[in-house]
Structure formats: structure tokens, C-alpha cells
Image (spheres, rainbow, N blue to C red):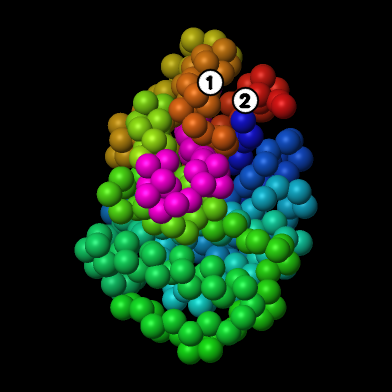
């Protein structure tokens, strides 16, 4: 299993984010990513809480690091036309020397969309837009002229020049919807990510993705399977209790929703839980961290948990 760090650029400073990105880059993590929200989702009713924009923050991440893969989990398909997103991704690929990984999703936060004047259609249309976006991105990354006539997007001889630095810029799709989303993953994605699922539910969604791959005549092994998981680790039982109490500070009203996908316990307990995710099909675990960042817990995880999964 490989590991990454994912941190929402909210409720914190750029200096703290830089510190976290450097930590990931220097301490053996495979991946580092941001997310794409206009407002802080620790309290989606309080638009005065600080939150940085996703593309610009990912560009800063790319420039601040030298080794880790750099990504976003995930860019909302509603926020930018696919061609604009393709150009942003290629720019970041050049800034990073070929380390960009592009994640996209259908979007879920209706309150932030309405607050900033972004259309937020029903889920069917959001998934339609996501699939058209995936198709267009893949075509544009080829560097050849692209003409596309979809229900929601139209391109006429569009060219993405320069091309990405890497021969194949991986496309990630995030989500867990079994009837439509995972079929889109099977059709278009190089990697799949889903946040805060229990090992049992992750295994179920993973099997569903395999079934869609079979129907779409896609090799299931060609799709990287990853899980975003929270972290509440402590050296002993007392420290673990304090970590659990701090979850409310970081996740607010979403705490109970995400709790099944939080790695909670001592290092030995976290290792045991990670083995369950490994058995469920997760090739990577990406630690989903929120400010204020728990530097002691992250250090403990890096020092005592990660070496147990070294190849």
C-alpha cells in the first residue's frame, strides 16, 4: 500500500499548507492534494471562514514540491468549462515537471454553488456534465484538434497546446454512486477515489466497479483504487480519546457522516484497520486532513505505521 496526504485549503494559512506539502514531499508519501471548494466546508453556512481556490492552490503545491504526485480530489465539473480545466491541468503538469494528476467529480455542495452564482442542476445533469467533461479532457490531452458536440459542452477545433509533459496524464474520478458514477469511472478513469467509507462498504463499491468494468470491456486492473481516510491516531488510549474529541473541531456537522472512514486508535490498531482496506481493494490510502493539522499524529503515523506497508 502507498500513502498520500490530502488537505482542504481552508481554515488555515498558505504557510501551514506549505509546511504540510513539504512534509509529504520529504517523508516518503506518494501523493499530495488539495480540494476544490469555494467556501470552507467545516461550516457550509458560514461563508466568512477562509478558503482558497483549488486551481491556484494546486499550482502552488506543484511549485512547492519536487517528488510527490500532485492532485486535487476533486475539481467540480460545474465550476469551469472542460477546456479551461484542461489548460489549467497542463499548466500544472509543466510547473511540476510532469507530476500532475487530474481529479474530477460531479459536485455536491449546493449552498456554495448558489452563493457564488454557479448553476447546480439535479444529479442526473451533474453526472452528464461529468461524463462529457471526462471525454473532452481525454481528447484534449492528446494535443490534437478536438471537435465535440454534447448536450452541455461544444468544442470547435480546440487544441490544448502545449501538451502535458507526461505521456499520459492520469484522470481520476471521485465518488461512489453505483448506478451511474462507477460506470463513468469504468469508461473514462485511470484512478478512482472515494472518501470516508468503511472497509466493508469500500469492498462493496470496489466489486461494483469491477462489474461495470466487465460490462464496459475494461480491464479492472487498469484503474487505480484509492481511499480517502481521516486520521485520529494516538500513542496510547488517552491520546486516542483526545483525538476523537478533536474530530468535531475539524469536521463539524459532518463528523458522524465521516466517522466510519477515519483511522482511529493506536498505531497497532490503525495498522490493523489499514489491512482491512488493503483486503477491500485499496491500493493507496490518502490521509484526508483538515486544519488545525495534528502534527504529532501525522509524525506518529509516518514513523510507526507507514513502514509496516513498505514494499
Residue 222 lies in the magenta-colored region: yes
Q: Can you identify the residue that label 2 sits on?
A: 301
**Discs 2, 1 touching: Cβ within 8 Å:** no
264 w.r.t. 76: above or below: above
Which residue appears at 59% of the width and 26% of the height?
A: 297
Residue 9 seen: no
Q: CA distance from mark 2 to mark 1?
A: 15 Å
Q: Is residue 81 left or right of residue 157?
A: left
Q: How many marks?
A: 2
Which residue appears at 36% of the width and 59% of the height?
A: 106
Quarter of the figure that contains the N terminus: top right
**Secondary structure found at label 2:** helix
- Where is residue 198 shown, x and y percent of the image? 38, 28
Q: Earlier in the sequence, mark 2 or mark 1?
A: 1
Quarter of the figure that contains the C terminus: top right
Q: Can you identify the residue that label 1 sits on?
A: 275
Amino acid at each position: 500500500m502507498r500513502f498520500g496526504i490530502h488537505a482542504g485549503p481552508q481554515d488555515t494559512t498558505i504557510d501551514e499548507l506549505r509546511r504540510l506539502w513539504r512534509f509529504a514531499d520529504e517523508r516518503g508519501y506518494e501523493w499530495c492534494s488539495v480540494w476544490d471548494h469555494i467556501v470552507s466546508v467545516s461550516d457550509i453556512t458560514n461563508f466568512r471562514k477562509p478558503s482558497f481556490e483549488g486551481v491556484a492552490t494546486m499550482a502552488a503545491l506543484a511549485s512547492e514540491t519536487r517528488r510527490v504526485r500532485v492532485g486535487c480530489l476533486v475539481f467540480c465539473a460545474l465550476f469551469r468549462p472542460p477546456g479551461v480545466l484542461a489548460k489549467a491541468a497542463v499548466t500544472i503538469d509543466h510547473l511540476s515537471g510532469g507530476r500532475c494528476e487530474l481529479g474530477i467529480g460531479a459536485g455536491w455542495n449546493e449552498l456554495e454553488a448558489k452563493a457564488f452564482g454557479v448553476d447546480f442542476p439535479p444529479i442526473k445533469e451533474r453526472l452528464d456534465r461529468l461524463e462529457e467533461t471526462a471525454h473532452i479532457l481525454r481528447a484534449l490531452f492528446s494535443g490534437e484538434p478536438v471537435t465535440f458536440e454534447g448536450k452541455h459542452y461544444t468544442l470547435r477545433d480546440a487544441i490544448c497546446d502545449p501538451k502535458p509533459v507526461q505521456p499520459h496524464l492520469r484522470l481520476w474520478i471521485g465518488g461512489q454512486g453505483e448506478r451511474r458514477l462507477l460506470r463513468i469511472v469504468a469508461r473514462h478513469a485511470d484512478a478512482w477515489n472515494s472518501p470516508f467509507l468503511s472497509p466493508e462498504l469500500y469492498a462493496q463499491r470496489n466489486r461494483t466497479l469491477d462489474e461495470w468494468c466487465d460490462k464496459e470491456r475494461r480491464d479492472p486492473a487498469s484503474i487505480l483504487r484509492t481511499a480517502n481516510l481521516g486520521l485520529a491516531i494516538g500513542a496510547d488510549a488517552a491520546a486516542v480519546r483526545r483525538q476523537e474529541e478533536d474530530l468535531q473541531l475539524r469536521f463539524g456537522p459532518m463528523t458522524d457522516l465521516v466517522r466510519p472512514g477515519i483511522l482511529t486508535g493506536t498505531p497497532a490498531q490503525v495498522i490493523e484497520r489499514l489491512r482491512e482496506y488493503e483486503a477491500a481493494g485499496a491500493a493507496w490510502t490518502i490521509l484526508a486532513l483538515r486544519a488545525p493539522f495534528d502534527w504529532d499524529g501525522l509524525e506518529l503515523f509516518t514513523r510507526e505505521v507507514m513502514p509496516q506497508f513498505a514494499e
